[in-house]
Image (cartoon, rainbow, N blue to C red):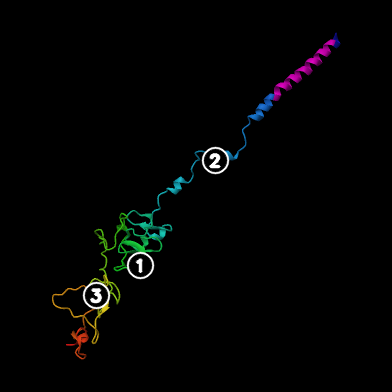
Amino acid sequence: MLALLTVVTVYLAVWGGITADAQVGPVLQNSIRHLPAASSPSDAVSASPRVTGTADSHAPSPHCAADDECRLGEFCNGSRGVCLSCRRRRKRCGRDGMCCAGNRCINGVCQPADTDATGTVDAALPVGNTDEPNIPVTRGQNFTHPKGTTSLPKPQQPLKGGEGETCLRSSDCLKGLCCARHFWSRICKPVLTEGQVCTRHRKGAHNLEIFQRCNCGSGLTCRGQREKPGAESRNLHTCQPR
């Protein structure tokens, strides 16, 4: 009887161990299967990633009192006390420091530094009075400054045109030149001297000359040739003393 009990006890112990192993196996497999996966490449890219540094990119410009306190490509606006982006070509300006690199403030407009324009703005306006909208100014348009700003110097007299340059009137040409027709335009030509061929206009005649000559110089008059008689010489006129 004792031997039978011993056999039954051993059998139950062995059977219980096998059953426990069978139950623990799936549990371990499931636990391994559902463990949180390690960081994968897909976790690094998000459909809506958190944007960092946005506040820095849209941060307001730092306060300033002079241009050298601003970053490259900016100037100090005195009325606001902040740094603003430089003005591009053909934008309104009040001084050279407001224009981007390679440009100057000429006649209130940012233009290339090598532009030789009449009436260059030499006196810089105060920084506090330059907060103006970027309105393009066409060539020849008058630039009116706000009240209280420094008045600009008077524009310099335009340069006179040399021989062969286009003109509208003789006052546009240098001394000793006149504005005469050349084809369908007008250019500066030299005033005729003694002995040069001239054109004598009849009173009341307004013939269109394609190659117009200047008049004879001071103290000269246009007369027909007298030294060579004949029909051809009568039609030839030269500048002769009065």
Q: Main secondary structure of the magenta part?
A: helix
Residue marked by disc 2: 45
Q: Dot 3 lies on which element?
A: strand
Whether the residues at callouts 1 and 3 have beta carbons within 8 Å, the answer is no
Q: Residue furthest left?
A: 204
Where does the image place residue 163, in percent across and percent down from the top left? 29, 77
Between 163 and 44, the residue placed more toward the observer is 163
- Classify the position of the C terminus by image quarter: bottom left
Q: Dot 1 lies on which element?
A: loop
Q: CA distance from mark 1 to mark 3?
A: 27 Å
Q: Which mark, residue 115?
A: 1
Q: Which mark, residue 142?
A: none
Which portion, as a residue range, is magenta? 4-25
Name the residue located 60 percent from the left edge and 39 percent from the top edge: 40
Whether the residues at callouts 2 and 1 have beta carbons within 8 Å, the answer is no
For marks 1 and 3 on the same chain, the one whose residue lies earlier in the sequence: 1
Q: CA distance from mark 2 to mark 1?
A: 52 Å
Q: Which mark, residue 179?
A: 3
Where does the image place residue 212, in percent across and percent down from the top left? 24, 76
Q: Quadrant of residue 213?
A: bottom left
For marks 3 and 2 on the same chain, the one whose residue lies earlier in the sequence: 2
**Position of residue 147 in the picture relative to residue 103 (left or right):** left
Q: Residues within 10 Å of mark 3 (few under 14, many from 20)?
A: many
Q: Quadrant of residue 221?
A: bottom left
